[in-house]
Each structure stands twice: as C-alpha cells, then as structure tokens.
Amino acid sequence: MLTCFSRILYAHATTFKPVTNIFAAYSTVVPLPHALYRTAEAQRVRQVSMVRPALDLGCGSGDFLRVGLHDIVDVGLDASLSRMSRHRRPLGYHHRCLGNAGRLPFAEEEFQTVLSVSVLEHLENPRAVLTEVCRVLKPGGLFVGTATLVDMHEQLFYPPLLRRVGLSPLARLYMRLHDRLFAHCCLLTQGEWEKMFAAAGLELEESRKIVSPRLTYYWDMLLPFALPYRLFQEWGYSFICRPPGVRALVQKWLLPLCYDDEDEGSSWFFVARKREESS
C-alpha cells in the first residue's frame, strides 16, 4: 500500500486554466473532435474545487491534467502501461503508478479528491471500482468526473444519416464498431449510475448530463479527422488531423457549444461526496 501522499502534501485546491486555453492545448495533442469533446468535459470539471491530496483514476497519458491544470496532482493511476508510457516523464503528477482500479494500491482514507474523466464506461466491474474509490477517500472527500452515457447512441451523426437512406443495418453496425473502437464496456443511463453511486456510499451533490446533443452530433461528424491519428501516430498525422485553418474554424463555430446548458447530453458529470463518519 502507498501511504505517503497525505502526510507530505498540504491540502489546497487545484486551479484550472481558461476553457479557450484548454482547447488550444488539447488541439495540439489529439484530433480536433476529441479536443472539442474533452474541452466540454473540462468546462464542467474545472468549476469544482478539488482539494489535495488528489488521485487521477485512469490517468492514461495524463493529457487532461497536463493541458487543463495549473497545478500538479499527487497521484495518477492507470491499468495500461502503454498509455502511461506515451510521456516518459510523469507530466502533471508527483507520482504515477500502474494498477487495477478495482483493487487500488492505497491505504484507506488516503485522498481528499478522486478525479475520473471518461473512465467508468471502460470498466467491466464499475461497482467494485466505486467501492474502492469510497475506501480511499477521506470522510467528506469528493469523487469528481464524467462518464459516457448510453444516450450517445441517439446523438451521433452517422447512424441517423444511414437510416434515412435505408441502411439501418449499417447504422447498427456503425454503433457497434463505435463502441468497440472507444472500448465502451459499460454504457449506462444517468439513473443507473446514480443508483450505483448510492449503493457504494457516495452521495451525489451534482448529477447532470453534459456534452450537448449538438456538440455530440458535430463530434461524430468530424471523427474522420481522427482516423489518420490512429493510423499514423508516430509521424505525418499532424497536417491531416489538423489542416491549416480548420482549428480556427472549429474554435469559432463549435467551441461555444462547450458551454451549452441543456437537459440532454452524451456524457454524465458527477460530484459525489463520501459520507461523513457518524459521531
């Protein structure tokens, strides 16, 4: 068990960069549609005061914190060595470690905040992960993050287009391939997540859908720009994924959609607090 973080670090809140800065930074490291989607998530997450010591659960290569935060987070954990190895230096973290989210290698009540951005939908056993998150949080600590919802299927661009031209089987195939490409193991409704959080002892202080249907629609429309990124990550993809002038157009016309305040969306934003110990 790792137990040093809360003893050596003072508790203070993290601070995020402005949304336009986050999009600009994201658009240099990931394809434009993904930069847009992640910025919409960051727009909500950045409004939460996250007190350290903090754990980034499912940190991957650390892009979210590296482009979004002014501060360094205490610990980043991910189950994939290849994702973590994309940056040789642990950018944005005091410590990074390889581990299973269902069996976190930390002592009880180790963190004041756990952050998890678009991770829960990739887990085969999210109930076990929520139990572990509750265990490592201090009483009154926060679990903050996002999760892709099953609602996404109804908000994509290409399936309705295929259905309109009589290609419903291709529309269904597209959604199956879409989930496979993005490794969606657990797409649930907002209500199903809320029940699961309550069962784990996490009281939701904020629960809402984000990434509006309009933004999800355009995100899916622009996904072909992301294909060269997957095929040629090591060389030559920058010009194809980010053609000159396209980023400026996306920023001008689509970035405002990150501020959409609607009742529907393809992602779930949550702020949950671990119940205080009874006196």
Image (cartoon, rainbow, N blue to C red):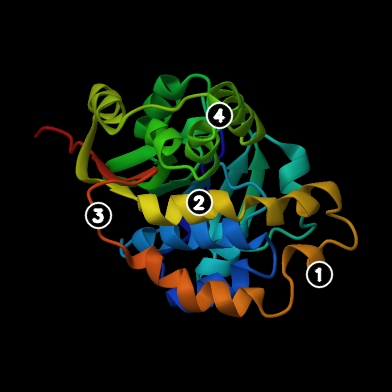
Residue 188, located in which quarter of the rendered image? top left
Q: Are marks 1 and 2 in contact (CB under 8 Å)?
A: no
Instruction: Pick the quarter of the image with the C terminus.
Output: top left
In the rendered image, which residue does mark 1 sit on?
A: 239
Label 4: which secondary element? helix
Of pointers 1 and 4, the one earlier in the residue sequence: 4
- Indicate which disc residue 171 carries: 4
Given the image, on which type of amino acid does mark 1 rest?
Phe
In the rendered image, which residue does mark 3 sit on?
A: 262
Label 2: which secondary element? helix
Q: CA distance from mark 1 to mark 4?
A: 30 Å
Q: Which of pointers 2 and 4 indicates the residue nearer the eye?
A: 4
Q: Residue at x 45, y 34 (%)?
A: 153
Q: CA distance from mark 1 to mark 2?
A: 42 Å
Q: Which of pointers 3 and 2 indicates the residue nearer the eye?
A: 3
Is residue 76 rendered to the left or right of residue 155?
right
Label 1: which secondary element? helix
Of pointers 2 and 4, the one earlier in the residue sequence: 2
Q: Residue at x 40, y 36 (%)?
A: 154
Q: Within 10 angstroms of label 4, few (less than 14), some, or many (20 or more) residues?
A: some
